[in-house]
Amino acid sequence: MASFDAEKAHANVAISAGERRRAALAEIDEAKFSWFHAKACLVAGVGFFTDAYDIFSISIAATMIGYVYHNGGSSTANQDLGIKVAHSIGTFFGQLLFGFLADHVGRKRMYGIELMIIIVGTLGQTVTGHAASVNFYAVLIMWRFIMGVGIGGDYPVSAVITSEFAARKIRGRMMTAVFASQGWGNFTSAIVSVIVIAASKGAIHRQPLNDLAAVDRAWRLIIGIGCVPAAIALYFRLTLPETPRYTMDVERNIKQASSDVDTYLTTGTYVVDPLRNVERAEVPKATWADFVEYFGQWQNFKILLGTSWSWFALDIAFYGLGLNSAIILTTIGFGSTTKLPTKQENIYQTLYNAGVGNIVLAVGGLIPGYYATFFLVDSWGRKPIQLMGFSLLTIIFVCMGFGYHKMLATSSGSKAFVFLYCMANFFQNFGPNCTTFIIPGEVFPTRYRSTGHGISAASGKLGAIVAQVGFSRLINIGGKNQFLPHILEIFALFMLTGVFSTLLLPETKNRTLEDLSLESQDHFVTDSVVGGIAPLTKTTGSGGSSQDEHRGHEIA
């Protein structure tokens, strides 16, 4: 009889813990947009703003570095490639590492660390110097790799924190708002470049080619300013609460999570009470065996395959499209120049043109694409947007590749090529560039959500590395830029594969994260223990949500 009573009490605990979990999840999923949601978007978005600023500012900085360290000339092909691809390699490792750690250590504990790494790596670049036994390029590549690790860590952690705090009906817009900060980072890096270069005009014109100190100061200042938004956001990241889903499903503390939900949705704050809110529930745990079992099922593995390949295919073209930027800038009148009387004047005008041209390209395609996704992602859906984007990009790259020579042979054709370039930028962002970031943050269970996003993002970064390294070696086969049309045709092929990988993915709009995990939620919580068995009773908390209060005796 005593054994029967114990089993009954044990069952009551499990039921109560499960009900509390469901009530807390429902409260998150159906919450109205609040200041806390806005704060979460801003705090996460600043990281992506910084990421994009640091990534895109190196394009003009690399040109400046070539002038400074080669007496008005340019870096070698290997030197230029090294400083441009180093951050991508670091990002690849950062995405895998932080994706894993955020699932095993916690989102909150990792949030802010990646920003610290970015700040240190960025400052390291600004003070990189040359000595008899120190190679400038080697040291700069090292710092860019370190910065890349931090940038990589920002992807899975920011995506998962945003998705786990977001309400069901606005989750897509919140995640898009975070990711759209990349466009503004790119835009701001171009604005800062123009301002710094314009301010250095007189000094650049006066200095001899073997002592371009003004150009040296300019690139260091442009890179270093990227630390400012990161430093501002650091405090807010360190004080952001742990997500209730992680607290419930990984830390197994359902009572603390319920308390967090009530407080941050009503007051925007949260309080951790380790003495009162300790309640360990029995839920599926992240282990290697469980990982293999979960992703060993085709219904789960095909989603990871779909998110990973889609991101890989997209980044082949997204980063590879940068190969066209010099041609586009020349076509629209913002290319490099050698027509002015002195070398110094040509250096200044080339740098100024690059900055202004990048502003035009950002406004012409990148930023509008992000906000087209923002307005439609929660009504039209992620999967239709991604399918549409890959399909149109396939057509665009076919036109650019097979019609390359004919278009650039005439003035009207050149304008058509520029238009297609801007449309490619637009439909990358109003398409797979946004959705490949959103979907991996939604489709995996809490215990593997960050890991799954990290694997998907790292696959994308592998595509970026292939584009930057591989295509830089191919582009001049047969002469300068002669292989470019074939590279655009290769882009079209990868966009077509993205259509098929998208078909592996579910539509995620208006669905809960638990529903998308493809795991039964009926018996997800099987046990609840606080040093022993304690009966629970249900009461109604603020806002009408169900809460469970611990009324038993805790055993020390």
Image (cartoon, grey):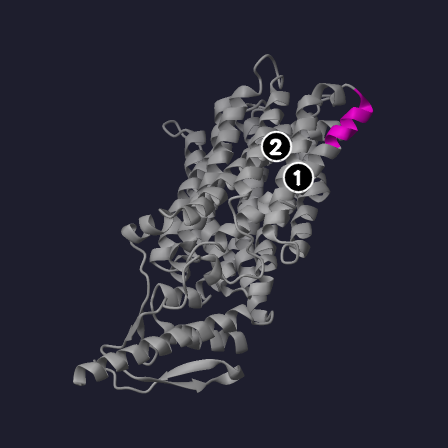
Instruction: Look at the image and say whether residue 415 sits in the magenta stretch.
Output: yes
Dominant secondary structure, magenta: helix
Q: Amino acid at mark 1?
A: Asn
Q: Which residue is mark 2?
A: 321
- Please state, as top left, top right, bottom left or bottom right, where the C terminus lies in the image: bottom left
Q: Nearer the viewer, residue 63 or 444?
A: 444
- Kindly indicate whether the residue at mark 2 contacts the one at mark 1 (C-beta within 8 angstroms): yes
Say which mark, if any, is on residue 425: 1
Q: Amino acid at mark 2?
A: Leu
SS at circle 2: helix
Residue 41, image x, y percentages: 56, 61
Q: Quadrant of residue 121?
A: top left
Residue 143, image x, y percentages: 43, 39
Q: Residue at x 32, y 50 (%)?
A: 293
Image side of residue 481 versus residue 337, left or right = left
Q: Which residues are magenta?
A: 410-418
Q: Residue at x 42, y 53 (%)?
A: 450
